[in-house]
Amino acid sequence: MIYTVECSFADPANEAQWNDFYSLEKLPALISVSGFHTSQRFKALTSGCPVYLAVHSIDNLDVLQADEYRRKGGGNFARWQQHITDWHRNLYEGLDRAPAIGADEHLVASATGPDALIKMGLVPYQMNAVALEKCPERRWLAKRGRFIDSGVKHLPQGVHLYVPMTNQLTSSRDAAPKTWQ
């Protein structure tokens, strides 16, 4: 299953520290939780969505309700909470593992259907919301090379482009990571 966390951060003076905390402390803590398999963080290049997106591959909803998750990763935002805005969490089925997006690639997400992604020459993977906010109810993800940045301002409504902020972290409990083509 794919667990997504999206938010924006409303304190520009402390945003670099927030990003260091999330990327260097929170993601490694999450990937150490039993049932977490991959974690990667992104920044939106398009408007109309939260600025930050974290995408995790997990076993199921029980992982997010376990004490280990609460101790190691969930809810340790006290220092930052007052600045976190537009916060959303969703759990999707349809993919076992999130795609690893390399430094020379983008993640493209659509909440309006696969057609726009197909027209961009991409292969969309559908996910269906099953828990937490369940909004958007469906989402399609695709991987795209960075060679066409000129189209960023002209993406259809509901389609968003993200650049990776981190490499995809993989749990030490998992064998070699599965790749997406």
Image (cartoon, grey):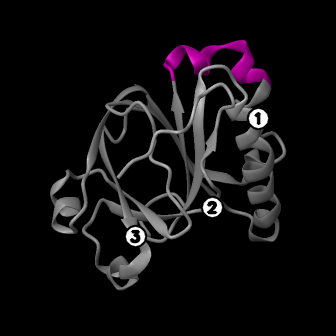
Q: CA distance from mark 2 to mark 3?
A: 15 Å
Mark 2 and mark 3 lie on one chain; the one further toward the N terminus is 3
Callout 3, which amino acid?
Gly
Q: Position of residue 137 (x, y in %)?
A: 30, 36
Report helix, strand or loop for mark 3: strand
Task: Find the magenta span and give its range.
Answer: 59-71
Report helix, strand or loop for mark 1: helix
**Residue at 22% across, 69% down:** 120
Mark 2 and mark 1 lie on one chain; the one further toward the N terminus is 1
* Residue identified by numbered label 3: 145
Taking the view exactly as shown, the residue that stands out farthest to the bottom is: 150
Q: Position of residue 87 (x, y in %)?
A: 56, 46
* Residue identified by numbered label 2: 165
**Residue at 39% across, 48% down:** 180
Question: Which of the 4 image quadrants contains residue 165?
Answer: bottom right
Is residue 22 a member of the stretch shown in magenta? no
Report helix, strand or loop for mark 2: loop
Determine whether label 1 and label 3 are within 8 Å by CB. no
Q: Residues within 10 Å of mark 3 (few under 14, many from 20)?
A: some
Q: Nearer the viewer, residue 26 or 80?
A: 26
Callout 2, which amino acid?
Met
* Residue identified by numbered label 1: 29
Determine whether label 2 and label 1 are within 8 Å by CB. no
Q: Position of residue 93 (x, y in %)?
A: 35, 28
Up-down: is 13 above or below 148?
A: above
Q: CA distance from mark 1 to mark 3?
A: 29 Å
Report the quarter where the N terminus lies: top left
